[in-house]
Amino acid sequence: MLAGGTAFALAWKSVDRFFWWSILIGGLAMVISVRAPHHLQYSASKTVNGEVIWSIDSKWCFLAALVLATFAVVFAVFRRVKSAKGLKIGNGITQP
């Protein structure tokens, strides 16, 4: 999740200077988020009298990291395209 957050922050800060870093870090975070649950899956639960009281599964943490990294890459590409076209981002006013 840290890599996805870093990629998003770089895309937010300056898409011209950090675009490729944002894409690289976000892509790496996406690959790790997809591959990690196959190797690092942890689950724990507590049962009392045969009834599950609580349960934790680590796959949901990897899913959240995947969503964040995907959003960061899409956001970086969106900002790069808008920047390349010379459009103003944020107030809805376009400039040629």
Image (tube, helix red, strand yellow):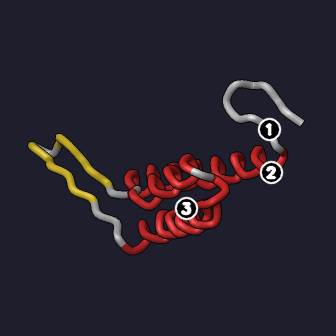
Quarter of the picture containing the C terminus is top right
Residue 41's spot in the image, x, y percent?
34, 66
Q: Which residue is mark 3?
A: 26
- Name which residue type carries label 1: Leu
Rendered residue at 31%/54% (across/down)? 57
Evaluate if marks 1 and 3 touch, with contact meaning CB atoms under 8 Å apart. no
Decide which of tag 1 and tag 3 comes sooner along the chain: 3
Of residues 69 and 37, the one nearer the viewer is 69
Between the residue at mark 1 and the residue at mark 3, the CA separation in whole angstroms equals: 24 Å
As helix, strand or loop, the secondary structure at mark 2 comes to: helix
Residue 29's spot in the image, x, y percent?
50, 64
Of residues 86 and 71, the one nearer the viewer is 86
Q: Which residue is mark 2?
A: 84
Q: Which mark is residue 87?
A: 1
Q: Is residue 7 above or below residue 82?
A: below
Residue most extreme to the right? 96
Residue 53's spot in the image, x, y percent?
17, 40
Rendered residue at 83%/30% (across/down)? 94
Quarter of the picture containing the N terminus is bottom left
